[in-house]
Image (cartoon, rainbow, N blue to C red):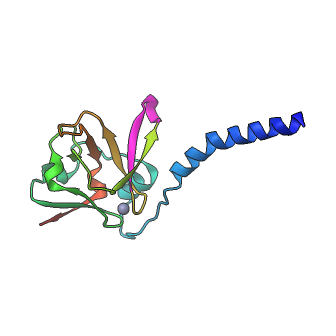
């Protein structure tokens, strides 16, 4: 009886610890665009990061929308883009439902990384030091984005 009880306790403990992690990882990652480069695949499906100041999108100032380079999901409006000085395209807000977030503990830091809600591709990290009213700064790898001017 006691044994059964202990088993039950450890069982529920196990699931309360493991299940939330599992459900976070459940975002299915899918390569949809077969023409993605090696660098794009590394960033989007292996949580890589491009070199700062390497993206042409840093200088992009036209009106339009930024889409996922893998699945074409519409992610950011040009009106939320700002120059953060970090060397990566930065946005104060994402379009509603564009991303799912996950806590990232790499490099001894606790950061919130975000993934395309549609295809699961990794795009970047979101920080709480942005200039907008909600204080967000989406730091996005330029290689993950396709800009479509209006
Ligand atoms: Zn996507």
Labels in figure, total: 0
The x, y position of residue 5, in whole percent, is 82, 37
| Residue found at the far front of this picture | 1
| Residue found at the far left of this picture | 62
Along the horizontal axis of the image, is 56 left or right of 114? left
The x, y position of residue 63, in whole percent, is 10, 59
The x, y position of residue 110, in whole percent, is 42, 32
Residue at 35% x, 67% y is 71
Along the horizontal axis of the image, is 57 left or right of 70? left
Quadrant in which ligand 1 is drawn:
bottom left
**Frontmost residue, 20 versus 9:** 9
Magenta residues, as a range? 105-116
Residue at 29% x, 44% y is 51
Q: Quadrant of the C terminus?
A: bottom left
**Frontmost residue, 142 versus 7:** 7
Residue at 43% x, 65% y is 31
């Amino acid at each position: 009886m006691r044994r059964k009880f202990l088993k039950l306790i450890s069982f529920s403990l196990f699931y309360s610890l493991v299940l939330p992690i599992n459900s976070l990882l459940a975002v299915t990652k899918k390569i949809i665009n077969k023409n993605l480069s090696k660098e794009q695949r590394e960033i989007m499906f292996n949580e890589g990061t491009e070199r700062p100041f390497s993206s042409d999108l840093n200088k992009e100032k036209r009106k339009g929308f930024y889409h996922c380079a893998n699945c074409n999901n519409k992610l950011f409006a040009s009106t939320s883009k700002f120059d953060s000085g970090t060397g990566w395209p930065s946005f104060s807000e994402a379009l509603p439902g564009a991303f799912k977030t996950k806590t990232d503990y790499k490099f001894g830091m606790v950061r919130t990384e975000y993934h395309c809600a549609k295809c699961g591709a990794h795009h970047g990290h979101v920080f709480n030091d942005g200039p907008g009213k909600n204080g967000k700064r989406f730091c996005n790898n330029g290689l993950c984005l396709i800009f479509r001017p209006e």
